[in-house]
Amino acid sequence: MVASVPMRRATRELPLAGCLILTGLALFFGGGAGGGSLPWVGGAALVLLVLLLATKGLPGGWLSLAPLAALVAWSALSIWWSTLGSRSWDYADRGLIYLAFAALGLWLAGRTPELALGLAVLLAGVAVWALAGKVLPPFASAPDPFGGARLRDPVGLWNQLALLGGFALPLALWLATRRRVAGVLLAYVWLVALVLTLSRGGIAVAAVVILAWLALDPERLNGVAALVAAALPAVLVCGVAFALPGVTGTGRSNATRWHHGLVFGAALIAGAAFAAVLSRAPTPRPTPVLRRAAIAAAGLLVAALVVVGAFKAGSAWRSFTSSSAVGNSSGRFGSASGNFRWVWWKQAWHGFEHHVVGGTGAGSFQLTNLRYRTSYLDVTTEPHDLPVQFLSELGLVGLVLLVVAAAVLVRPGLRRRGHELALAFVLPAYLLHALVDVDWDFLAVSAPAFLVAGALAGRPAPERRVSAFAAAMAAGVAVLAFAALLMPWLGERWSDDALGALGGRSAHVISLAKRARAVDPLLVEPLWWQADAEQGPEQALALFDEATRKQPENPQTWLLKARFELENDCPRMALDDLYKFNALDPYERPSAGPDDYQKALRLVNSGAPTC
């Protein structure tokens, strides 16, 4: 009987503790846009789902996840017709994990205060980790392609790190109404981190959710006071950061980064102390004079924005739609360049026009970009707009399912107050940011967004125990789902091992390539590495030919086959394959295909080749 008390307590805390641990893993070890962490975080989520189903029963509100489940199923089905099947499998796996996090959230419907506090603590840890990389260079991940100019750790990319700031700031303002100093400090570290990401979209989303919070929260005066207490020292600290090239500059020596980082660290600590002192200042009382002053200030701000927008709208639109990139320095704040986004959106639309109902397959925009681009400079894997991406990759069906799933999950957050209002901004912030970025690719931002959405969509309900047979069936489904997560990871790992082994023993390369093909038959890379290791040209050519049959819309399959044919004195065959390559990727740089075409054409026109 005594032992049963701790057991009951552990069972009661399992949903909250398990979900927060999983969210922490996603935030700190999500692996950026890569898939290395997917089977492990996803597998842990599946285990927790089965445990909760067996011990807590079926949660309330599970029907609200039906549209999201349908979207995941449609993504998986698109593998059948996808132009890039291996990528579609990966995308379906991501959707499955996000569905699992949303399902886990259903069990937290009665624990939203603890969820809000736990998420605030985790996000504070993310901000501290990110800023620590500026103070102490070894904390920053390496290599950084921009020399450490933009804050990106531990998420992997600055824009997604900035989005987490959009999650954290409403939580900070809510927390400030209960624990003033803690809330102000959370807002302070995230305001500094937001600016140092240099993410225009992330900062804009954070500004929108803060304004929405202040408009909807009855304790808005406390929120304004907390925001001012956090923003004043944050502005000073950011000024120090931009004055230190070792903190916000590119290509600086390690010694400079260390020296300037320590100076920045001292300023950061001093700013935190200043914010803590300001947080203790009394909040002004809501007098009529103060209320009228606030309304007047808001009116002036809106008028200023309208005037500036009227004068700058034309030039801003031309800059946004131009095919130009913007630098990764603080000067990007003054630029309206879309970094090729308008170009990518038009490419996605062209892809949709040719595949209206089902699209080109989940995650396949990379090939659409190659086919419709007009320069080799604008290469990308995503169009940086989630609805546009799903329209292109999953067709009208996918877009409708996405809109319905988003609407059903956002609706439960309406008319919330306090901590639930702060949580209710997480999914809208995610969806708003996804209009200009690649958030679906990042476990670190998607997992917490769907977990919170599930918690708000769930309903506290009496425990409805499931039978042992049902629990066993759920465990079996979870095992199959984990296999679907693990197999692409194993296939990619063994394929990479085969690539690394090229130049060594051919038998070892072939063995690794066959292993990769066995667990992920949609991959074409193992076929290439096995072909390179084969001794006979007939066997190698057969493997290159198989790759073109697996992914006939992938220009690389045709290019590598053509190069092999050129190396084996068959320029006529190579020329035919290079025609197909040029049709699929007409604007590749010369050294990455067009030079091979010119070589094959010269050899064929010479009249000498017979093959």
Image (tube, rainbow, N blue to C red):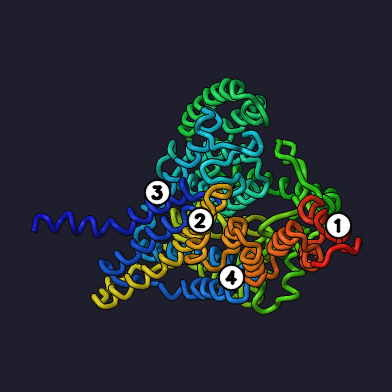
The residue shown at (40%, 41%) is 179
In this view, the residue farthest toward the right is: 606
What SS does tag 1 mark? helix
* Kind of residue at disc 1: Gln
**In the rendered image of this protein, does residue 1 appear above or below residue 481?**
above
Task: Give the residue number, with chain letter if any, for mark 3.
Answer: 117
- Which of the pair 368/213 is nearer the observer? 368
Q: Quadrant of residue 82?
A: bottom right
Cα gap from disc 1 to disc 2, whole angstroms: 35 Å
User: Which callout, 1 or 3, points to the residue nearer the camera?
Assistant: 1
| Labels 4 and 2: the sequence-earlier one | 4
Mark 1, Cα crowd under 10 Å, few <14 / some 14-19 / many 20+, is some
Sequence-wise, the earlier of marks 2 and 3 is 3
Query: Residue 237: which numbered mark, if any?
Result: none
Dot 2 corresponds to which residue?
A: 507
Please tell me which of labels 1 and 4 falls first in the chain.
4
Tell me if mark 4 has few (under 14), some (14-19) or many (20+) residues whose alpha carbon lies within 10 angstroms of its own.
many
Q: Which percent across, then down, holds residue 310?
A: 83, 52
Viewer-nearest of discs 1 and 4: 1
**Marked residue nearer the N-terminal end (4 or 3):** 3
In the rendering, at what x and y percent does residue 424 appear?
Answer: 50, 59
Crowd class of label 2 (few under 14; some 14 to 19; many from 20; radius 10 Å) = few
Residue 415 shows in this picture: no
Horizontal and vertical percent position of residue 73: 51, 74
Q: Secondary structure at mark 2?
A: helix
Nearer to us: label 4 or label 3: 4
**Residue at the image position 58 percent from the left and 56 percent from the top:** 533
Residue nearest the viewer, comparing 169 with 130: 130
Contact check, label 2 and label 3, Cβ < 8 Å? no
Disc 1: which residue: 598
* Callout 3 secondary element: helix
